[in-house]
Image: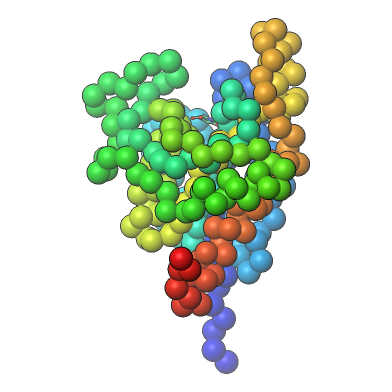
Amino acid sequence: MPARRPPPVLLVTAFEPFGGFSSNPSMEVLAGLRAPPGCRLVRATLPVAFAAAAESVPRILDQARPAAVISLGLAADSPGLRLERLANPLWAEPGQSPRPEQRLEGPGVRFTTLDIDDLALRLCRAGLPAAVSQDAGRYLCNFVYYLVLGWSARHQIPALFMHLPPTPRLAAEHALRTGRILPSMDVERMTRAVQIAAAQITARRARKAAGATESP
Ligand code: PCA
């Protein structure tokens, strides 16, 4: 009997809590995510520290050998879902400017190959406020995205970074601490959005595997 091909892996990464927040919405979304049809879902939660991320991200990618990657992180001031188009090699702690040596190895800015304009449209049509962003910042989300996009370019797989707003609970905790209200979105909606993104990013792979050509 011929050996069955293992199902393609969708790797979804989240981040640990940081910056005084008691949780990271990316972890909450990751916990509720289901594998898209025909795929195996591999979850990884990353530390919010440059050296640890630089060590763990390549290792996780090499172990999981994903056919697609979605990375998630918190953008505390974002009023909706931000689909990141690109990652910058420069990195710095919040509120600081990158020093000349704070630059990842690579050819310059890296772009996702996923049609995120179409994804933003689909999410908005599903009642989930989303927009494309041209700047993932200079902190860990951008840093991890740069590493992931490098791996994904070498292995010719699609990758996406989605920034999430705080949950209502995190926004309420922040208001208690600071008196300032942050925008928020509930975990159920954010999970639905990531599930739609997962379907799109893996469907593209399925079409490719079936030998279909890109439609105009
Ligand atoms: N957000 C931060 C790092 C971890 C996270 O969830 C960022 O936007 O870089």
- Quadrant containing the N terminus is bottom right
Residue depicted at 66% across the width and 38% down the height: 129
Q: Is residue 194 above or below residue 53?
A: below
Judged from this view, the residue extending furthest toward the bottom is: 1
Q: Does residue 59 appear anywhere in the picture?
A: no
Point out residue 64 in the picture as x, y percentages from the top left corner.
49, 58
Displayed quadrant of residue 17 = top right
Of residues 77 and 29, which is closer to you in this image?
Answer: 77
Judged from this view, the residue extending furthest toward the front is: 216
Point out residue 123 in the picture as x, y percentages from the top left corner.
64, 47
Q: Does residue 98 appear anywhere in the picture?
A: yes
Residue depicted at 51% across the width and 77% down the height: 210
Point out residue 95 in the picture as x, y percentages from the top left corner.
43, 15
Of residues 174 and 165, which is closer to you in this image?
Answer: 165
Residue depicted at 73% across the width and 38% down the height: 187
Displayed quadrant of residue 169 = top right
Residue depicted at 33% across the width and 57% down the height: 154
Point out residue 194 in the picture as x, y percentages from the top left corner.
64, 47
Q: Is residue 3 above or below residue 32?
A: below
Q: Is residue 32 above or below residue 52?
A: below
Q: Is residue 185 above or below residue 30?
A: above
- Colour scheme used in the picture? rainbow
